[in-house]
């Protein structure tokens, strides 16, 4: 098979670039570290302009291009758009602008859901912006016309996770309220927000035990590993590897919340001025 990234195979030891509108993409970083422990990672969280879900398509595309340029300038071999909103509206644009493999979080989760859904009755939960975009429904039905998709916005999950209330009775009660009428209709549930893996156990407790939960962070990391393997881009480095974190605002708060996402502390988060993004 022809390798479209042949000219960067000699740069296989460069980092993977990952970005999100805020913190949620750290669940993808956690899975990348778990599956690809020898890879370096550069993460950008656009904490000054979060959330993206209530912004126009043009604005999200502009922000995504700025961040992708920032990552590319630091020398990377791949970009992971770890944001459902940016994956919905900016992924194809980014793929036309950069001569790098670039993936989002929607298609990996959709493909896994179809592979694991016996009755093709798939639920999707996410932020209001992601659900209103209809992108998961579009991707799922494009892959299999027989699929029935049932989508539900769960906007309170994000602040509950960021407040550290993920595994509490409050979150369980909110989940039951959101999901009680969705459960009888589905056999598979996609976590369509990168914050939601933090409360996956709570969600599994609330839904029927037979319902398969698709963690898009895991599926995205799976696809990254497959692409790097297929095109000879796996790192030859040995541990310890280097992880860099950049944000557009509130680096100290990012450090505090990131520890809950990654399960370990991080330090030296660097704030980037928005005017320096081009």
Image: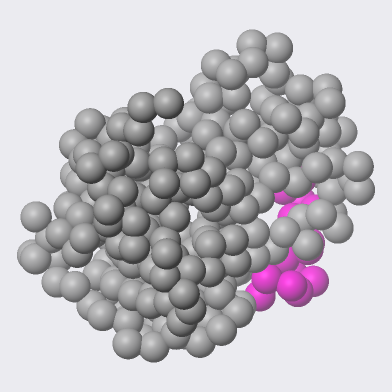
Q: Which residue does the image show at 75% across and 74% down from the upper left?
A: 168
Q: Position of residue 212 (x, y in %)?
A: 80, 42
Q: Which residue does the image show at 21% across and 60% down from the upper left?
A: 75
- State whether residue 133 is above or below residue 196: above
Picture quadrant of residue 246: bottom left
Closer to the camera in the image, 76 or 67: 76
Q: Position of residue 232 (x, y in %)?
A: 41, 46
Q: Quadrant of the N terminus?
A: top left
- State whether residue 70 is above or below residue 62: below
Span highlighted in magenta in the image: 165-179
Q: Which residue does the image show at 46% across and 81% down from the upper left?
A: 240
Q: Position of residue 104 (x, y in %)?
A: 43, 42
Is residue 71 visible to the viewer in this orientation of the structure?
yes
Kindly report the secondary structure that dominates the magenta region of the rendered protein: helix
- State whether residue 208 is above or below residue 93: below
On whether residue 112 falls in the magenta region, the answer is: no
Q: Which residue does the image show at 60% across and 24% down from the upper left?
A: 140
């Amino acid at each position: 098979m022809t390798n479209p990234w042949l000219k960067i195979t000699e740069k296989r030891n460069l980092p993977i670039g990952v970005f999100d509108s805020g913190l949620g993409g750290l669940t993808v970083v956690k899975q990348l570290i778990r599956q690809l422990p020898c890879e370096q990672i550069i993460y950008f969280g656009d904490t000054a302009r979060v959330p993206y879900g209530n912004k126009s398509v043009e604005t999200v595309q502009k922000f995504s291009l700025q961040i992708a340029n920032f990552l590319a300038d630091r020398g990377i071999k791949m970009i992971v758009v770890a944001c459902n909103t940016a994956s919905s509206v900016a992924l194809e644009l980014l793929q036309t602008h950069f001569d790098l493999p670039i993936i989002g979080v929607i298609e990996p989760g959709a493909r896994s859901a179809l592979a694991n859904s016996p009755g093709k009755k798939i639920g999707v939960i996410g932020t209001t912006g992601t659900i209103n975009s209809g992108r998961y429904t579009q991707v799922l039905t494009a892959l299999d016309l027989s699929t029935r998709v049932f989508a539900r916005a769960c906007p309170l999950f994000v602040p509950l996770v960021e407040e550290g209330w993920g595994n509490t009775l409050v979150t369980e009660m909110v989940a039951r309220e959101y999901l009680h009428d969705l459960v009888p209709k589905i056999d598979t549930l996609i976590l369509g927000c990168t914050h939601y893996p933090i409360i996956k156990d709570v969600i599994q407790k609330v839904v029927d035990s037979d319902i398969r939960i698709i963690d898009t962070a895991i599926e995205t990391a799976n696809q990254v590993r497959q692409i790097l393997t297929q095109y000879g881009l796996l790192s030859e480095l040995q541990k310890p590897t280097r992880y860099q974190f950049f944000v557009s605002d509130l680096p100290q708060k990012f450090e505090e919340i990131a520890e809950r996402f990654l399960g370990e502390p991080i330090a030296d988060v660097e704030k980037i001025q928005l005017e320096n993004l081009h």
